Amino acid sequence: MGPEQASALQARYARRAGPIGLTVEELDFEHFPVKNGFPGIPVKAWIRFPNCAELVDGEVFAWTPKAAEVTWQDGPVTYRTWVWSSAVTRREEMMNRNLGERTNRDSNTE
């Protein structure tokens, strides 16, 4: 088994162990109340697993000033995982930023 196969296998087993979300103490809902919004906000979010992290496509329906609850799917299973706000980016912002970077780069080559 090569290093790439071993890495892929490790990532698959790490995901099977389940995501690592924020604790109740970290979320501190008493001082940082939850807000809810519908429809969900499409996001890309870094989700932590034992020994690895994965960038997933998800939606945010609930958040606090410092954290967001990301709803995402891994195959047939739907997860809800609380992560720090800094681990989440709106998908439209990522697409717009990438488009802007391409546009600037293309206009610089003329």
Image (spheres, grey):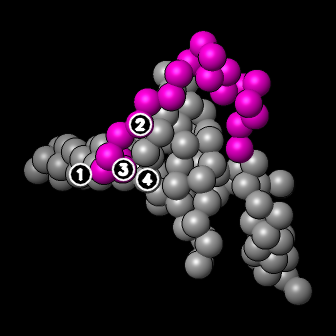
Q: Nearer the viewer, mark 2 or mark 4?
A: 2
- In the rendered image, which quarter contains the N terminus? bottom right
Question: Is residue 103 or residue 37 the one in the foreground?
Answer: 37
Dot 1 corresponds to which residue?
99
Left or right of 97 on screen, residue 49: right
Label 2: how many Cα within 10 Å (few below 14, some 14–19, many 20+): few
Q: Position of residue 63 (x, y in %)?
A: 48, 33
C-alpha gap between disc 1 and disc 3: 23 Å
Tell me which segment is drawn in magenta: 21-41
* 40 inside magenta stretch: yes
**Tags 1 and 3 in contact by the CB under 8 Å rule?**
no
**Disc marking residue 59:** 4
Mark 2–mark 4 distance (CA, rounded to whole Å): 12 Å
Residue at screen point 59% across, 78% down: 75
Q: Residues within 10 Å of mark 3 (few under 14, many from 20)?
A: some
Which residue is label 2 attached to?
A: 36
At label 4, the amino acid type is Glu
Where does the image place residue 87, in percent across and percent down from the top left?
56, 39
Residue 88 appears in the picture as rendered: yes
Q: Which residue is mark 3?
A: 40
